[in-house]
Amino acid sequence: MNISSQNKQHESNQLVAVIGLLFGAFCWGIIWFPYRIMSDAGISGAVSSFYTYLIATTIGCIYCAKHWRGLFKLPLSIVWLAIFAGWTNLAYVLAVIDGEVMRVMLLFYLSPLWTLILAHFWLKEKTQLTGYIAIGISILGAFIMLYNPHISNMPLPRNTSEWLALSAGMGFSLSNVITRRSAHLSLRAKSFAVWIGVLSMSLTFMIFTHNITMPSFLSATNWLVMLGIALLLIAATLFVQYGVTKIPATRASVLFLFELVVAAIASYYLANESMVLNEWIGGTLIVSAAIFATLNNSN
């Protein structure tokens, strides 16, 4: 293969990777809507998450059946990854069902702040100047967005959904740090850890809240919606994994911020939600901090 052909192949791979990342961002920016459809039908977020990830895991198990032999040779770190990633995904779903979509997502996007702090104290990574700038901008953005003197003198989340969003961001950060410490794990193993983690967390939450819903209670429409969500999750996982292996981390992270654009448009037209001035200002600062943190982690 000559140099010209190699360049064309590289450009083609880059284009597919960009499209894959944008598609993954689109999926995560819109996936709250079918979960809300399920909630409106009387199916809780924990129940719909359980059955959605059950479908995704079943499809994944069939597709990856030949890799089962190494299942019991996986290190203990994959259990911790499953726990924190499982909580991240469940908490995010529970948050976007009842909370304002953009506030939930922006609170989730404080995760680079927690990742920087964890990487500094747990992984002993030296924090660059851009990292300290990111921490400061994140805190300022959160303060501007959350501060409401009519509700509280402290800039705190104002309801359960926002606390869940904040905890989801923290869980995502812990997942990132564990993933960084477990570079030996394959992408396939990490994907299954997430799916099994959400299954376990959802089942635990259902038992704890006494909200066990048997499959027979769900209608054909419910199953079709959950199948659609499961296919979106699988597609998003595969496309994003392909994208991050072909594109530098800095560029990939910035492209993934497209999720916020999709969520803002979708929440406005599908849920009649819009942000006020302080939320726009705070949100802009949080997104800027995410970019700074990405630059820091790429050095």
Image (tube, rainbow, N blue to C red):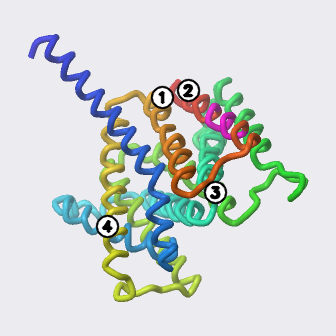
Dot in front, 4 or 2: 4
Circle 3 residues within 10 Å: few <14, some 14–19, many ≥20:
some
What x and y, as percent, mark residue 272?
59, 55
What x and y, as percent, mark residue 240?
36, 43
Q: CA distance from mark 3 to mark 1?
A: 28 Å
Circle 4 residues within 10 Å: few <14, some 14–19, many ≥20:
some
Q: Nearer the viewer, residue 144 or 74?
A: 144
Q: Amino acid at mark 4?
A: Leu
Q: Earlier in the sequence, mark 1 or mark 4?
A: 4
Residue at 36% over, 43% down:
23
- The reply to whether residue 120 is in sight is no
Q: Which residue is mark 1?
A: 250
Name the image quarter holding residue 20.
top left
Name the image quarter holding residue 76.
bottom left
Range of residues picked out in magenta: 282-288
- The reply to whether residue 165 is in sight is yes
Q: Which residue is mark 4?
A: 227
Q: Secondary structure at mark 1?
A: helix
